């Protein structure tokens, strides 16, 4: 079939593939002329990126839960990590713990809760708030120390220790304060490890018939992926 130039400027007689390769360049295409319907098919979930040679390529579909990340040069699918709360536990009670024997030995209070890790080497944020009462007769001040005991089936570990400066009250007085502590713990445990955190308390010295008590408490444990 002959190629005919029509009077309206159109051509007839050109079959598909009739033009030589490379004859149609970018300048011959109008802006926004290529619609998505005119593009070659693409496997579901793939996206087009530039490769090292500056050519468009189809990026392989990532795995479930992965995120698209950049290394500053290329992008690729990778594990989404950092900044997430993986799990949490919350406990609250008005139960009390008392020390009326002026003991200077740390002892467990009723402030305790447990969490089971969902990922290896995650970080545990431990927050405890409670009301603390203290009193002392005679000279000197009533001083109470606290620490956090971590237990997970092995030897006990202590992630925070303050022997003498948490609460201090004047003698011949009985007073109360709302105490609050936040600790960041890196237990370096495997996934599926049950960890119990307990607030321990002690009196600083044995003089003056000191007493202490905690009540109205709550504890929050959050496992963080950082």
Image (cartoon, grey):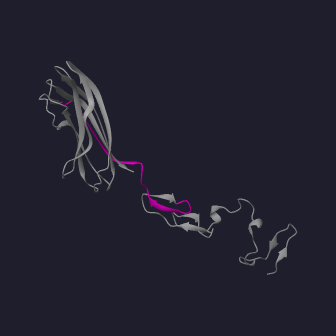
Quadrant hosting residue 125: top left
- Horizontal relation, residue 8 to residue 102: left or right: right
Q: Is residue 76 magenta?
A: yes
Q: Is residue 42 visible?
A: no
Where 50 falls versus 134 (above or below)? below
| Quadrant in which the N terminus appears | bottom right
Q: Nearer the viewer, residue 53 or 72?
A: 72
Where 60 falls versus 68 (above or below)? below
Q: Is residue 28 magenta?
A: no
Image coordinates for residue 191, horizontal then vertical, percent: 29, 56
- Horizontal relation, residue 112 to residue 3: left or right: left
Image coordinates for residue 195, horizontal then vertical, percent: 24, 48
Q: Could you tell me which residue is drawn at 16 percent across and 29 percent down?
A: 98
Q: Nearer the viewer, residue 208 or 133?
A: 208
Quadrant hosting residue 127: top left
Q: Which residues are magenta?
A: 71-96
Q: Is residue 176 visible?
A: yes
Image coordinates for residue 48, horizontal then vertical, percent: 58, 64
- Horizontal relation, residue 176 to residue 123: left or right: left
Q: Residue furthest right?
A: 7
Q: Could you tell me which residue is drawn at 21 percent across and 20 percent down?
A: 171
Quadrant hosting residue 19: bottom right
């Amino acid at each position: 079939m002959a190629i005919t130039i029509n009077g309206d400027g159109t051509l007839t007689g050109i079959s598909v593939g009739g033009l030589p390769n490379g004859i149609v360049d970018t300048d011959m295409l109008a802006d926004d002329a290529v619609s998505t319907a005119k593009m070659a098919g693409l496997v579901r979930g793939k996206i087009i990126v530039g490769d090292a040679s500056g050519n468009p390529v189809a990026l392989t579909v990532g795995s479930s839960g992965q995120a698209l990340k950049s290394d500053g040069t290329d992008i690729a699918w990778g594990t989404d990590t950092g900044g997430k709360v993986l799990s949490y536990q919350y406990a609250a009670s008005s139960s009390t713990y008392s020390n009326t024997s002026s003991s200077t030995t740390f002892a467990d209070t009723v402030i305790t809760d447990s969490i089971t890790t969902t990922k290896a080497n995650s970080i545990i944020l431990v927050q405890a708030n409670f009301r603390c009462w203290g009193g002392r007769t005679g000279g000197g001040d009533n001083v109470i120390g606290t620490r956090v005991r971590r237990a997970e089936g092995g030897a006990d570990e202590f992630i925070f220790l303050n022997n003498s400066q948490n609460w201090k009250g004047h003698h011949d007085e009985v007073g109360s304060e709302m105490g609050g502590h936040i600790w960041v713990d890196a237990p370096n445990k495997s996934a599926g490890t049950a960890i119990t955190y307990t607030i321990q308390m002690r009196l600083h010295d044995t003089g003056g018939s000191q007493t202490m008590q905690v009540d109205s408490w709550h504890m929050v444990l959050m496992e963080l992926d950082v």
